[in-house]
Image (tube, helix red, strand yellow):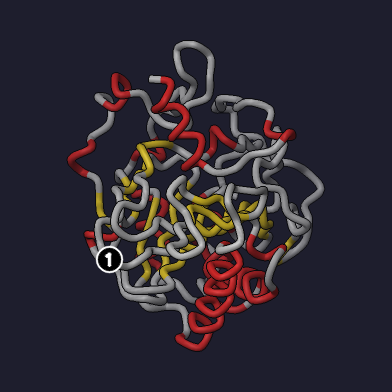
Amino acid sequence: MTPEEILSHRPKVLSDKQREDYFTKGYILVESIIPREQIDLLRAATDSFVEKSRTLTKSDNVLDIEPSHTAENPRLRRLSSPPDHHPAYWDYASQGVVADMMEDLLGPNVKFHHSKLNFKWSKGGQEVKWHQDIQSWPHTNYSPLTIGSYLHDVDDDMGPLICIPGSHEGELFDQFNDDGSWDGFIKDRDLQRLDLESGEVLTGPAGSVTIHNCRTAHASRPNHSPTPRPLLLYTFSSADAFPYTPNPIPSRYSGKLIRGTMPRHAHHDPRPCLVPPDWSGGYTSLFEVQSKAMERA
Protein backbone atom coordinates (compact mmCIF):
# COMPACT_ATOMS: atom_id res chain seq x y z
CA MET A 1 0.00 0.00 0.00
CA THR A 2 1.10 3.55 -0.62
CA PRO A 3 1.35 6.05 2.27
CA GLU A 4 -1.74 7.79 0.88
CA GLU A 5 -3.72 4.53 0.98
CA ILE A 6 -2.57 3.80 4.53
CA LEU A 7 -3.42 7.31 5.70
CA SER A 8 -6.93 6.91 4.28
CA HIS A 9 -7.63 4.35 7.03
CA ARG A 10 -8.65 5.70 10.43
CA PRO A 11 -5.74 5.25 12.90
CA LYS A 12 -6.12 3.06 15.99
CA VAL A 13 -3.55 4.55 18.37
CA LEU A 14 -1.27 6.96 16.50
CA SER A 15 -2.33 10.47 15.56
CA ASP A 16 -2.54 11.56 11.94
CA LYS A 17 0.45 13.83 12.56
CA GLN A 18 2.55 10.96 13.93
CA ARG A 19 1.74 8.88 10.87
CA GLU A 20 2.50 11.76 8.52
CA ASP A 21 5.78 12.41 10.36
CA TYR A 22 6.76 8.76 9.93
CA PHE A 23 6.23 8.87 6.18
CA THR A 24 7.98 12.25 5.86
CA LYS A 25 10.99 11.71 8.16
CA GLY A 26 11.30 7.93 8.01
CA TYR A 27 10.94 7.50 11.78
CA ILE A 28 9.05 8.66 14.86
CA LEU A 29 9.38 8.55 18.64
CA VAL A 30 6.19 7.82 20.60
CA GLU A 31 6.64 8.52 24.29
CA SER A 32 5.16 6.47 27.15
CA ILE A 33 2.70 4.50 25.02
CA ILE A 34 3.36 1.02 26.46
CA PRO A 35 1.47 0.25 29.71
CA ARG A 36 3.68 -0.08 32.78
CA GLU A 37 2.41 -3.57 33.62
CA GLN A 38 3.55 -4.79 30.20
CA ILE A 39 6.96 -3.18 30.65
CA ASP A 40 7.27 -4.96 34.01
CA LEU A 41 6.58 -8.33 32.34
CA LEU A 42 9.20 -7.64 29.66
CA ARG A 43 11.76 -6.54 32.25
CA ALA A 44 11.25 -9.75 34.23
CA ALA A 45 11.68 -11.88 31.12
CA THR A 46 14.81 -9.94 30.15
CA ASP A 47 16.33 -10.26 33.63
CA SER A 48 15.93 -14.04 33.38
CA PHE A 49 18.18 -14.12 30.30
CA VAL A 50 20.79 -11.97 31.98
CA GLU A 51 20.90 -14.57 34.74
CA LYS A 52 21.11 -17.38 32.19
CA SER A 53 24.05 -15.68 30.49
CA ARG A 54 26.19 -16.09 33.61
CA THR A 55 26.86 -19.71 32.59
CA LEU A 56 28.23 -18.71 29.16
CA THR A 57 31.86 -18.29 28.22
CA LYS A 58 31.20 -17.54 24.55
CA SER A 59 28.30 -16.41 22.38
CA ASP A 60 25.82 -18.93 21.03
CA ASN A 61 22.90 -18.68 18.60
CA VAL A 62 20.65 -17.21 21.29
CA LEU A 63 22.83 -14.92 23.42
CA ASP A 64 25.62 -12.73 22.04
CA ILE A 65 28.02 -11.62 24.79
CA GLU A 66 30.84 -9.08 24.90
CA PRO A 67 34.44 -10.38 25.08
CA SER A 68 34.73 -9.13 28.68
CA HIS A 69 31.60 -10.99 29.83
CA THR A 70 31.94 -13.03 33.03
CA ALA A 71 29.57 -14.77 35.41
CA GLU A 72 30.23 -12.11 38.03
CA ASN A 73 29.93 -9.22 35.58
CA PRO A 74 27.60 -10.22 32.71
CA ARG A 75 27.85 -8.05 29.61
CA LEU A 76 25.34 -8.94 26.91
CA ARG A 77 25.05 -7.54 23.41
CA ARG A 78 22.00 -9.36 22.05
CA LEU A 79 19.24 -11.89 22.66
CA SER A 80 18.20 -13.24 19.26
CA SER A 81 14.55 -14.06 18.48
CA PRO A 82 13.17 -13.26 21.95
CA PRO A 83 9.62 -14.52 21.15
CA ASP A 84 11.04 -18.00 20.52
CA HIS A 85 12.39 -18.13 24.06
CA HIS A 86 9.77 -16.48 26.26
CA PRO A 87 6.01 -16.04 25.68
CA ALA A 88 5.96 -12.48 27.07
CA TYR A 89 7.88 -11.26 24.04
CA TRP A 90 5.45 -12.72 21.49
CA ASP A 91 2.37 -11.63 23.41
CA TYR A 92 3.75 -8.10 23.37
CA ALA A 93 4.49 -8.12 19.64
CA SER A 94 1.37 -9.81 18.35
CA GLN A 95 -1.48 -8.05 20.12
CA GLY A 96 -2.50 -4.80 21.76
CA VAL A 97 -0.82 -1.47 21.23
CA VAL A 98 2.16 -2.74 19.19
CA ALA A 99 -0.07 -4.48 16.66
CA ASP A 100 -2.28 -1.37 16.52
CA MET A 101 0.70 0.87 15.75
CA MET A 102 1.86 -1.50 13.02
CA GLU A 103 -1.57 -1.42 11.41
CA ASP A 104 -1.54 2.40 11.59
CA LEU A 105 1.74 2.52 9.62
CA LEU A 106 1.58 -0.58 7.39
CA GLY A 107 -2.11 -0.92 6.61
CA PRO A 108 -4.58 -3.62 7.63
CA ASN A 109 -2.41 -6.62 6.65
CA VAL A 110 0.73 -6.89 8.78
CA LYS A 111 3.41 -9.60 8.90
CA PHE A 112 6.21 -10.35 11.39
CA HIS A 113 9.77 -10.83 10.09
CA HIS A 114 12.27 -11.05 12.98
CA SER A 115 13.19 -9.68 16.39
CA LYS A 116 16.11 -9.15 18.74
CA LEU A 117 16.89 -7.53 22.06
CA ASN A 118 19.99 -5.33 21.89
CA PHE A 119 21.41 -4.67 25.35
CA LYS A 120 24.14 -2.02 24.88
CA TRP A 121 25.64 -2.67 28.30
CA SER A 122 26.69 0.01 30.78
CA LYS A 123 30.04 1.81 30.85
CA GLY A 124 31.12 1.23 27.30
CA GLY A 125 28.33 -0.74 25.63
CA GLN A 126 29.24 -0.93 21.95
CA GLU A 127 28.27 1.75 19.46
CA VAL A 128 26.35 0.89 16.30
CA LYS A 129 27.83 2.56 13.23
CA TRP A 130 25.72 4.31 10.61
CA HIS A 131 23.77 1.82 8.52
CA GLN A 132 20.47 1.02 6.86
CA ASP A 133 18.59 -2.17 7.68
CA ILE A 134 17.08 -3.38 4.43
CA GLN A 135 20.41 -4.38 2.85
CA SER A 136 20.66 -7.15 5.46
CA TRP A 137 17.26 -8.65 4.62
CA PRO A 138 15.97 -7.27 1.27
CA HIS A 139 12.25 -7.54 0.51
CA THR A 140 10.11 -7.04 -2.58
CA ASN A 141 9.20 -3.58 -1.29
CA TYR A 142 10.32 -1.05 1.31
CA SER A 143 7.44 -1.29 3.76
CA PRO A 144 9.45 -3.12 6.49
CA LEU A 145 9.95 -1.10 9.65
CA THR A 146 11.49 -1.73 13.04
CA ILE A 147 9.90 -0.76 16.33
CA GLY A 148 12.18 -0.42 19.34
CA SER A 149 10.80 -0.45 22.88
CA TYR A 150 12.48 1.30 25.82
CA LEU A 151 12.25 -0.97 28.88
CA HIS A 152 13.95 1.72 31.00
CA ASP A 153 14.34 5.48 30.76
CA VAL A 154 16.85 6.32 28.02
CA ASP A 155 18.90 9.53 28.08
CA ASP A 156 21.73 10.94 25.94
CA ASP A 157 24.47 9.08 27.81
CA MET A 158 22.93 5.64 27.16
CA GLY A 159 23.53 5.47 23.42
CA PRO A 160 19.99 6.09 22.11
CA LEU A 161 18.97 5.71 18.49
CA ILE A 162 19.95 8.54 16.12
CA CYS A 163 18.04 8.86 12.82
CA ILE A 164 18.61 11.13 9.82
CA PRO A 165 15.32 12.68 8.70
CA GLY A 166 14.38 12.03 5.08
CA SER A 167 17.22 9.54 4.52
CA HIS A 168 14.68 6.81 3.71
CA GLU A 169 13.93 8.66 0.47
CA GLY A 170 17.61 8.88 -0.48
CA GLU A 171 20.09 6.34 -1.76
CA LEU A 172 20.75 2.88 -0.40
CA PHE A 173 24.41 2.55 0.47
CA ASP A 174 26.76 -0.35 -0.27
CA GLN A 175 27.60 -1.99 3.08
CA PHE A 176 30.27 -4.32 1.68
CA ASN A 177 33.94 -3.57 2.20
CA ASP A 178 36.13 -2.89 -0.85
CA ASP A 179 37.60 -6.39 -0.43
CA GLY A 180 34.14 -7.95 -0.78
CA SER A 181 33.57 -8.73 2.90
CA TRP A 182 30.39 -7.59 4.64
CA ASP A 183 30.86 -4.61 6.98
CA GLY A 184 27.25 -3.93 7.89
CA PHE A 185 27.80 -0.17 7.96
CA ILE A 186 28.14 2.78 5.59
CA LYS A 187 31.70 3.59 4.56
CA ASP A 188 33.17 6.88 5.79
CA ARG A 189 33.53 8.24 2.26
CA ASP A 190 29.83 7.63 1.62
CA LEU A 191 28.75 9.28 4.87
CA GLN A 192 29.71 12.60 3.27
CA ARG A 193 26.52 12.29 1.22
CA LEU A 194 24.38 12.20 4.37
CA ASP A 195 23.50 15.20 6.52
CA LEU A 196 24.79 13.76 9.79
CA GLU A 197 24.32 17.09 11.55
CA SER A 198 20.56 16.73 11.11
CA GLY A 199 20.51 13.43 13.02
CA GLU A 200 17.82 13.36 15.71
CA VAL A 201 18.62 11.67 19.03
CA LEU A 202 15.58 9.72 20.23
CA THR A 203 15.53 9.73 24.03
CA GLY A 204 12.50 8.94 26.15
CA PRO A 205 11.07 7.42 29.32
CA ALA A 206 10.40 3.73 29.83
CA GLY A 207 7.43 2.62 27.76
CA SER A 208 8.38 4.80 24.79
CA VAL A 209 8.95 3.36 21.31
CA THR A 210 11.00 4.33 18.29
CA ILE A 211 9.80 3.30 14.84
CA HIS A 212 12.04 3.61 11.78
CA ASN A 213 11.71 2.60 8.15
CA CYS A 214 14.05 -0.02 6.71
CA ARG A 215 15.77 2.56 4.47
CA THR A 216 16.37 5.15 7.22
CA ALA A 217 20.05 5.80 8.02
CA HIS A 218 20.60 5.40 11.75
CA ALA A 219 23.25 4.74 14.39
CA SER A 220 23.83 4.86 18.14
CA ARG A 221 26.78 5.90 20.29
CA PRO A 222 28.36 3.82 23.09
CA ASN A 223 26.54 3.63 26.41
CA HIS A 224 28.66 5.64 28.85
CA SER A 225 26.10 5.55 31.66
CA PRO A 226 26.22 3.19 34.67
CA THR A 227 22.95 1.57 33.49
CA PRO A 228 22.46 -1.00 30.70
CA ARG A 229 20.13 0.06 27.86
CA PRO A 230 18.08 -2.93 26.70
CA LEU A 231 16.23 -2.12 23.46
CA LEU A 232 13.60 -4.64 22.35
CA LEU A 233 13.34 -4.59 18.54
CA TYR A 234 10.75 -6.11 16.20
CA THR A 235 10.66 -5.90 12.41
CA PHE A 236 7.31 -6.03 10.64
CA SER A 237 6.23 -5.48 7.05
CA SER A 238 3.06 -5.13 5.04
CA ALA A 239 1.83 -8.62 4.24
CA ASP A 240 2.51 -8.09 0.50
CA ALA A 241 6.27 -7.74 1.14
CA PHE A 242 8.30 -10.94 0.77
CA PRO A 243 11.99 -11.46 1.62
CA TYR A 244 14.43 -12.27 -1.17
CA THR A 245 17.06 -13.86 1.07
CA PRO A 246 17.28 -16.09 4.17
CA ASN A 247 16.27 -14.44 7.43
CA PRO A 248 19.47 -13.60 9.37
CA ILE A 249 17.57 -14.05 12.66
CA PRO A 250 15.13 -16.89 11.92
CA SER A 251 12.14 -17.50 14.15
CA ARG A 252 9.22 -19.92 14.22
CA TYR A 253 7.07 -16.80 13.88
CA SER A 254 8.79 -15.48 10.73
CA GLY A 255 6.16 -14.63 8.12
CA LYS A 256 3.30 -14.92 10.58
CA LEU A 257 0.39 -12.51 10.17
CA ILE A 258 -0.40 -10.41 13.22
CA ARG A 259 -3.21 -8.49 11.52
CA GLY A 260 -5.42 -9.01 8.48
CA THR A 261 -5.12 -11.59 5.72
CA MET A 262 -2.39 -12.76 3.36
CA PRO A 263 -2.67 -11.02 -0.03
CA ARG A 264 -2.69 -12.99 -3.27
CA HIS A 265 -0.07 -10.82 -4.95
CA ALA A 266 3.33 -9.52 -3.90
CA HIS A 267 3.99 -5.80 -4.17
CA HIS A 268 7.29 -5.08 -5.96
CA ASP A 269 9.06 -1.75 -5.58
CA PRO A 270 11.05 -0.98 -8.75
CA ARG A 271 13.98 0.49 -6.79
CA PRO A 272 16.81 -2.08 -6.50
CA CYS A 273 18.27 -3.31 -3.21
CA LEU A 274 21.74 -4.58 -2.32
CA VAL A 275 21.86 -8.35 -1.66
CA PRO A 276 23.76 -9.38 1.51
CA PRO A 277 25.88 -12.48 2.13
CA ASP A 278 24.10 -15.82 2.51
CA TRP A 279 22.86 -15.79 6.12
CA SER A 280 21.46 -19.34 6.00
CA GLY A 281 24.56 -20.64 7.78
CA GLY A 282 24.00 -18.46 10.84
CA TYR A 283 24.35 -14.92 12.13
CA THR A 284 25.28 -13.59 15.57
CA SER A 285 24.55 -9.87 15.66
CA LEU A 286 25.27 -6.56 14.00
CA PHE A 287 27.57 -5.82 16.93
CA GLU A 288 29.69 -8.85 16.06
CA VAL A 289 29.67 -8.12 12.32
CA GLN A 290 30.70 -4.49 12.76
CA SER A 291 33.37 -5.40 15.34
CA LYS A 292 34.99 -7.90 12.97
CA ALA A 293 34.87 -5.35 10.16
CA MET A 294 36.72 -2.82 12.33
CA GLU A 295 39.33 -5.45 13.20
CA ARG A 296 39.95 -6.02 9.49
CA ALA A 297 40.33 -2.30 8.83
Q: Position of residue 197 (x, y in %)?
A: 18, 40
| Residue in the picture at 36% in, 37% down | 130
Res 99 visible: no
Residue placed furthest toward the top? 179
Q: In this view, does 92 lie to the left or right of 173?
A: right
Residue at which label 1 appears: 226
Comparing 110 with 116, the one in front is: 116
The answer to whether one can see residue 33 in this image is yes
In the rendered view, would you say 75 is above or below 86? above
Q: Residue at x 70, y 53 (%)?
A: 239
**SS for callout 1:** loop
* Residue name at image x 63 percent, y 39 percent: 283
Quarter occupied by residue 253: bottom right
Residue 80 location, quadrant:
bottom right
Numbered disc total: 1
* The C terminus: image quadrant: top left
Pinpoint residue 96: horizontal percent, then vertical percent. Answer: 60, 79
Compared across the picture, whether 256 is left or right of 129 comes to right
Q: Where is residue 16 in the image (x, y as percent from the top left)?
A: 40, 67
| Residue at point 58%, 65% (across, down) | 103
Q: Residues within 10 Å of mark 1 (few under 14, many from 20)?
A: few
The residue lying furthest to the bottom in this view is: 37
Relative to 227, does residue 286 appear above or below in the rendering?
above
**Where residue 235 sits in the image (x, y, percent)?**
58, 54
Query: Relative to residue 245, is residue 72 drawn left or right?
Result: left
The residue lying furthest to the left in this view is: 197
- What's under tag 1, amino acid-wise? Pro
In the figure, is residue 294 to the left or right of 139? left
